[in-house]
Amino acid sequence: MPDQTPLKIAIVGAGLGGLVAALSLARNGHEVQLFERRPTFEPKGGGIMIRPVASHFLQQWGLKADMENISDISKATLYRDGGTGKVFVRRNNDVTFGDKPDWGCFREDAQKVFYDHALQHGVRFRFGATVTDVSEDDLTARVHLSTGEVVEVDLLLAADGILSRLRPKILPNAPSPALGYSTIYQIRLSEDDVLADPDARELANTPDLSVWMKRAGGGYAVVRCNKTVHRLSGAFGILERDDDPRLWDENGDIEYVRNYFKGYSKALTSFLQIAKRCDRWRLAEIPDLPQWISPKGRLVLLGDSSHAMLPDATQGFSTIVEDVGVLSHLLSKYQGRGVPSLTKIWQEVRIPRVNRIKDWAKSNHTMYTKGADAQLKAVEKDRTPPTQDISLDKVEPDMNASYRSPAFFKWAFGFDPIEDVERYIQKKDQARL
Ligand SMILES: Cc1cc2nc3c(=O)[nH]c(=O)nc-3n(C[C@H](O)[C@H](O)[C@H](O)COP(=O)(O)OP(=O)(O)OC[C@H]3O[C@@H](n4cnc5c(N)ncnc54)[C@H](O)[C@@H]3O)c2cc1C
């Protein structure tokens, strides 16, 4: 690690984004305080994928063993007819690039791992601390708490989620979240409970991830069994307009979900019968923002507050880990250039990649909800073998290639964010000479 003065950094929000930022920055020697409005640490939530670029960073930050204790790697994705359960496309899931696994785990388990590591690295957690405002001048960022307390730091990261109240303070003209037309109902079940049901058992007997779609479109479902922790996650997507202003609710209506999926395959309906409860997650995204930082560069939007996306590329959190990896790198290696110039470089490098991934997620969402027939037509039209089944050694990564192409696949999963930012800095420095 190059010589550096520890920076004072404030993070608002102890979600997945705030936690990984805290642990990564504290690990690099910075003084990190994290402000969370909830009174205590409350890990919660359904299944989440941690994609290869993100898993690489987590390993570098010393989390390999702990992540392996909570994750597994699914061998294949099975696209299934929602009605009959018949598999119509099977894709190998081998998207491991070198030592960068494609992990599947549960959000609550990951949060615990991140929280423990953040504590070990000396992060000061302040629960029950609601941030009402932020401000900055050339040298300082300020956190304003509901109690009237003001904390001065060198850099503030607003990781306060998709409904961020700090976003309009940092970017006065920032748009509100754009609501989608789907709601995801998430379920967790124990492997034993599913194995005990003869109709649902097949879901627990395989490490494969299954995606159900109706032939003509409509509701879809994604189920996988995490064999490491012996729990299954199910995400049930329902196309609907939902006027509830809360985007997330711990108590979804399981009876409503069962009714909606009546007539779907027996394994799926039995899975829903075993479930006693679900949570409800109304899908929304933040329209592409022109910038993620304040005018003086000391207030930064991080995570869903800047780029919440649809979940259908399973990349929302993974792109946040990439963002954090690049920011940590810049603040360590180039601290002499000053915080404002580094946050500017950071957003210039990160925004184009993240916006492309957001668009990919949207395109996947359309494909899932249009149903199996549309998916089959797309596969036939492509005529290329499934990306995971061919060697990518000679493929040139290309962010502008079609989402189903090997070139895009390699760009999405084989990307090196540090190499990317280093290339950018070199180019900028050369242009200045
Ligand atoms: C159904 C679904 C499935 C998904 N699956 C995947 C996946 O497989 N892979 C993937 O990479 N991503 C996935 N994502 C995306 C991922 O979950 C999010 O990108 C990520 O959780 C966002 O984390 P965050 O920390 O930015 O925000 P949040 O998790 O929303 O955290 C915000 C925190 O800020 C706190 N807070 C808010 N306001 C204040 C305030 N004023 N003062 C103090 N604290 C405050 C809140 O209490 C909260 O704890 C999925 C998303 C959905 C909806």
Image: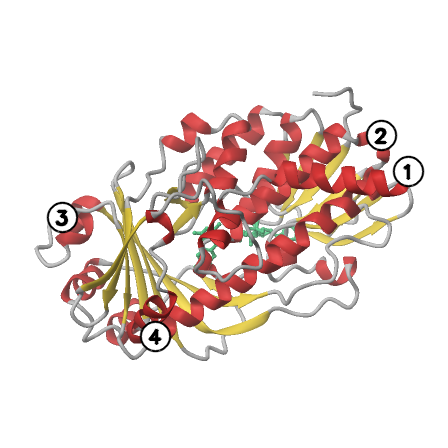
The residue that mark 3 highlights is 195
Front disc: 4 or 3: 4
Is residue 250 placed above or below 320 in the rendered structure? below
The mark closer to the camera, 1 or 4, is 1
User: Helix, strand or loop at disc 1?
Assistant: loop
Q: In this view, does 194 lie to the left or right of 104?
A: left
Q: Which amino acid does label 1 sit on?
A: Leu
Q: Which of 253 and 290 is in front in this view?
A: 290
Disc 2/disc 4 C-alpha distance (Å): 53 Å
Instruction: Work out whether 335 lies above or below 207.
Output: above
Gap between marks 1 and 4, in whole Å? 53 Å
Image vertical order of residue 379 relative to residue 52, above or below: below
Kind of residue sitting beneath label 3: Leu
**Mark-to-mark CA distance, 2 and 1:** 19 Å
Q: Residue at x 63, y 30 (%)?
A: 123
Give me the disc on residue 336: 2
